[in-house]
Image (cartoon, grey):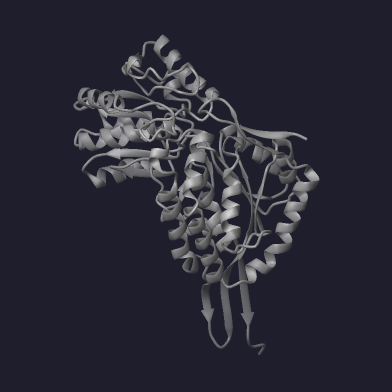
């Protein structure tokens, strides 16, 4: 029997392992989910909403288990308390808009006709969740999917093997029926076979670009709906009128928090020449204050990357850029804990340009490049010179200018004076190789349901 393992970045040990389901066993999970879906969808909407909220509340009660498990599985320091703030914000918001988002669109209600568009659950939704924010990314789809009347099958990345178990445990203990929300352990071949067989009505995948391509190939010809959130190389642009201190604080946090392992993390920054020197100096000082170390130590503010192979990619990108003329500004002596493996010191590179992979390819680590620019036009061209498009962070006091620039940036979300944040009232979406579809907001509910039109003629004369 094939085993799926989580290798802990803390010490390289096998932290958890589970047997992968056979294809027949996986099909049985889907069959149970499909059988349970109609009855679940017939429950009153408010009942489904409250059960989801109870599930979220139950997970909050499990923080003493969840937080250290996250540290062991993917390296986030216990200092930050897990993902509860964003998890709760998203759960509560989608609950607050569920009734309006799923309400019929009434075109006519007269003594002659009833014409309306209702929202109907897809059926069985398959959520394939990533390891970097395993609770928050999963709940983006799980909560609205269940509220809308779908059943959910959840598969997590092997790096966060236990997260799906914890989520299902919490929701089932809160009263969600076992077959309505199920966790599975699957290898890639079985996952692809299930999708290719049309087992699911909708698939939501968060992960790599290559993973997204695999999902599309598997779903080809099945007409299965897909939501894909893939890679990113998100830019920040600091204009001459920016609040320098706030820009440094937010952009450096956005570049390095969670060891830089965030799909909407800041990976490249363009600074107007008038602020460039000051911005770089303050950024190096900011990053140098991190304490790299064991994530179970409450004093640690920067843990290891989730896997030593991820850290290897970051080191290779930095070395390549330096070999082509870039300069690394953070003194490695400040971080003796950098072991050449999963524990990786943060880094800032200057004298970078777009001929370097470091400024074009996803880094997904605690390293960022900073370039000097002279104008909005130059910054805009550089921001758009990417195969990705998830978010862009603009720093200025002029909202009209930010809006004008934002319309020209090829991205899913435009931030002004903030970064690395997912607003559940807005649609989380990307362009180019970052993917397609959108989660959260009213649009998220629409993507997790299908429209059904009712044309009821009351008279025949």
Nearer to me, 267 or 147: 147
Q: Position of residue 177 (x, y in %)?
A: 65, 62
Residue at x-position 73% and y-position 53%? 30
Q: Position of residue 459 (x, y in %)?
A: 64, 88
Q: Position of residue 131 (x, y in %)?
A: 54, 38
The vertical placement of 50 against 307, above or below, is: below
The vertical placement of 408 against 337, above or below, is: below
Residue at x-position 42% and y-position 53%? 426
What is the tally of numbered marks visible in this picture?
0
Would residue 122 be found to the left or right of residue 72 on screen?
right
The vertical placement of 435 against 348, above or below, is: below
Q: Most extreme residue toward the right, as rendered?
A: 24
Q: Position of residue 181 (x, y in %)?
A: 63, 56
Q: Where the C terminus falls, by quadrant? A: bottom right
Nearer to me, 183 or 374: 183
Residue at x-position 21% and y-position 35%? 245
Nearer to me, 184 or 232: 184
Regarding residue 409, the answer to whether it shows in the image is no
Q: Where the N terminus falls, by quadrant? A: top right
Regarding residue 6, the answer to whether it shows in the image is yes
Nearer to me, 422 or 138: 138
Would residue 179 be found to the left or right of residue 295 on screen?
right
């Amino acid at each position: 029997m094939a085993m799926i393992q989580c290798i802990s970045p803390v010490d390289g040990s096998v932290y958890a392992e589970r047997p992968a389901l056979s294809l027949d066993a996986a099909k049985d999970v889907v069959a149970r989910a499909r059988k349970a879906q109609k009855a679940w969808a017939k429950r009153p909407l408010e009942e489904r909403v409250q059960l989801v909220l109870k599930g979220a509340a139950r997970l909050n009660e499990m923080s003493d288990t969840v937080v250290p498990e996250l540290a062991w599985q993917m390296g986030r320091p216990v200092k930050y308390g897990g993902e509860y703030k964003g998890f709760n914000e998203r759960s509560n918001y989608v609950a607050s808009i569920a009734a309006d988002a799923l309400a019929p669109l009434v075109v006519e209600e007269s003594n002659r006709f009833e014409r309306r568009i209702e929202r109907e659950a897809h059926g069985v939704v398959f959520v394939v969740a990533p390891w970097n924010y395993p609770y928050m990314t999963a709940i983006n789809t799980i909560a609205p999917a269940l509220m809308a009347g779908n059943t959910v099958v959840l598969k997590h990345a092997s790096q966060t093997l236990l997260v799906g178990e914890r989520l299902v445990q919490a929701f089932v203990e809160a009263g969600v029926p076992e077959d309505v929300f199920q966790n599975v352990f699957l290898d890639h071949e079985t996952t692809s076979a299930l999708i290719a067989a049309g087992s699911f009505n909708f698939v939501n995948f968060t992960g790599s670009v290559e993973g997204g391509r695999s999902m599309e190939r598997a779903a080809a010809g099945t007409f299965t709906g897909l939501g894909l959130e893939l890679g990113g190389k998100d830019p920040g642009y600091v204009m001459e009128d920016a609040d320098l201190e706030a820009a440094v604080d937010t952009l450096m946090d956005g570049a390095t928090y969670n060891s830089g392992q965030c799909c909407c993390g800041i990976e490249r920054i363009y600074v107007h020449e008038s602020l460039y020197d000051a911005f770089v100096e303050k950024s190096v000082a900011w990053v140098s204050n991190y304490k790299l170390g064991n994530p179970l130590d409450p004093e640690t503010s920067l843990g290891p990357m989730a896997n030593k192979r991820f850290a290897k990619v970051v080191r290779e990108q930095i070395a390549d850029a330096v070999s082509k003329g870039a300069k690394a500004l953070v003194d490695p002596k400040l971080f003796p804990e950098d072991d050449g493996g999963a524990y990786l010191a943060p880094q800032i590179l200057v004298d970078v340009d777009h001929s370097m992979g470091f400024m074009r390819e996803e880094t997904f680590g605690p390293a960022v490049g900073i370039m000097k620019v002279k104008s909005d036009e130059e910054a805009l061209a550089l921001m758009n010179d990417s195969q990705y498009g998830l978010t862009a962070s603009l720093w200025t006091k002029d909202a009209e200018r930010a809006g004008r620039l934002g319309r020209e940036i090829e991205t899913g979300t435009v931030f002004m004076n903030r970064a690395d944040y997912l607003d559940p009232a807005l649609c989380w979406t990307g362009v180019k190789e970052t993917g397609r579809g959108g989660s959260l907001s009213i649009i998220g509910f629409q993507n997790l349901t299908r429209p059904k039109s009712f044309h009821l003629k009351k008279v025949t004369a």
